[in-house]
Image: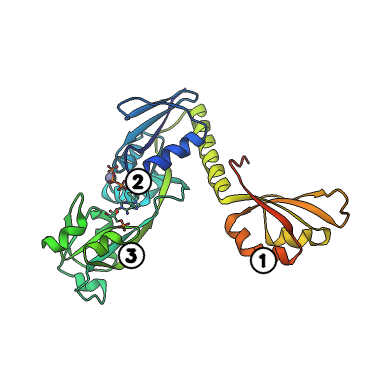
Amino acid sequence: MTRLKIAIQKSGRLSDQSLELLENCGIQFARSKDKLFWYGRNLPVDLLLIRDDDIPRLLLDGVCDLGICGENVARECLLDRQRSEAELTPEVALGFGFCRLCLALPETVSFDAVSSLDGRRIATSYPALTQEYLRKHAVSAEIVELSGAVEIAPSMGTADAIVDLVSTGTTLRANQLREVALVMESQAVLYSGTRRLDDEAGKLRALLIKRIVGILQARDSKYVMMHAPKAAVDAIADILPGAESPTVLSLEGQPDKVAVHMLCTETVFWEHLEELKAMGATAILVLPVEKMLT
Ligand code: PRT
Ligand code: ZN
């Protein structure tokens, strides 16, 4: 059977959460010292720990079967290599690594429209995405490609504007830059590559994807338990829609009351807490859900 090859970032913002996700799927890795290649001990899976920028390329070239990287890196690679989006299949948006690729200018420079960048120099580590953005806005500007420290380009005099990733905005502010337009939003995504897998490896890939979806669902879910008037059970189930119908249990010595157990998302629970209390719910307990197996 072919061993499934999974690529994650070796060391950076996505590394810890990517590894944690795979280990939560039940894969146990024999960690090697050089940290480049880890062997799956209990499943036929090999882990490649590499730079995030290399992940989409290895998926496209059929070297890896699954990989986790930012949408920003994946799209940049597709555009740069002129490959079709269909060749890199987004399987699951993972809910971490959130950021946005933005156009930013020095705070002192006024900005009306993207067209004002005509003939200017824009520094970026994302030349293909920047080029695509400029083309969409019919702007012709010179792209200055930098591999890092893009934010200092305007003060160094090497560019008039930048296109860079932003999450909190602290880096821009520290460099007297301001965000003027959004190029793309991004988060970490699990992608499938192009290599043809034999039946068993294909099944294992599908199983791991399913487990990851289950883990993400569980993270967002809470197991809620409460005592409530029997008559309010339907109304409670309506405002807290769970995965399946609620479990209703009788309460010793309290014929009009029941215990209601159900799954719901944390946000929904907080939004409706006061309503639940108004319906007569008491002894409300909220528990984390470790895994959800569907
Ligand atoms: O060595 P390797 O190439 O693997 O790592 P890297 O340095 O290229 O990547 P890394 O670890 O910095 O980022 C990996 C991925 O994390 C990116 O491709 C994005 O998908 C995602 N991500 C999320 C970010 C950020 N947030 C982020 N804030 N990537 C980079 N930044 C940088 C940004 O470039 C800027 O320098 O953080 C600075 C801005 O942050 P704020 O909070 O000050 O706005
Ligand atoms: Zn990188």
Pointer 1 local density, CA inside 10 Å: few below 14, some 14–19, many at least 20? few
Q: Is residue 63 visible?
A: no
Check disc 1 and report the residue beneath it: 274
Disc 3 and disc 2: Cα gap in Å? 21 Å
Q: Quadrant of residue 108?
A: bottom left
Q: Earlier in the sequence, mark 1 or mark 3?
A: 3
Disc 1 and disc 2: Cα gap in Å? 38 Å
Q: Nearer the viewer, mark 3 or mark 2?
A: 2
Residue found at x 28% / y 56%:
129
Residue at the limit of the structure toward the left, as seen here: 157
* 26 relative to 93, above or below: above
Work out whether residue 243 or residue 135 is closer to the camera in this orientation and state it. Answer: 243
* 11 relative to 230, above or below: above
Q: Earlier in the sequence, mark 1 or mark 2?
A: 2
Label 1 sits on a secondary structure element that is helix
Q: Are marks 3 and 2 in contact (CB under 8 Å)?
A: no
Q: Nearer the viewer, mark 1 or mark 2?
A: 1
Residue found at x 19% / y 74%:
109
The amino acid type of the residue labelled 2 equals: Arg
Q: Are marks 1 and 3 in contact (CB under 8 Å)?
A: no
Establish whether ligand 1 lies closer than 8 Å to the Cβ of label 2: yes
Q: Nearer the viewer, mark 1 or mark 3?
A: 1
Residue 44 image offset from top left, x and y in percent: 46, 25
* 41 relative to 168, above or below: above
Check disc 2 and report the residue beneath it: 13
Check disc 3 and report the residue beneath it: 182
Q: Quadrant of residue 110?
A: bottom left
Image quadrant occupied by the C terminus: top right
Q: Is residue 142 left or right of residue 269?
A: left
Q: Is residue 231 left or right of residue 214?
A: right
The amino acid type of the residue labelled 3 equals: Leu
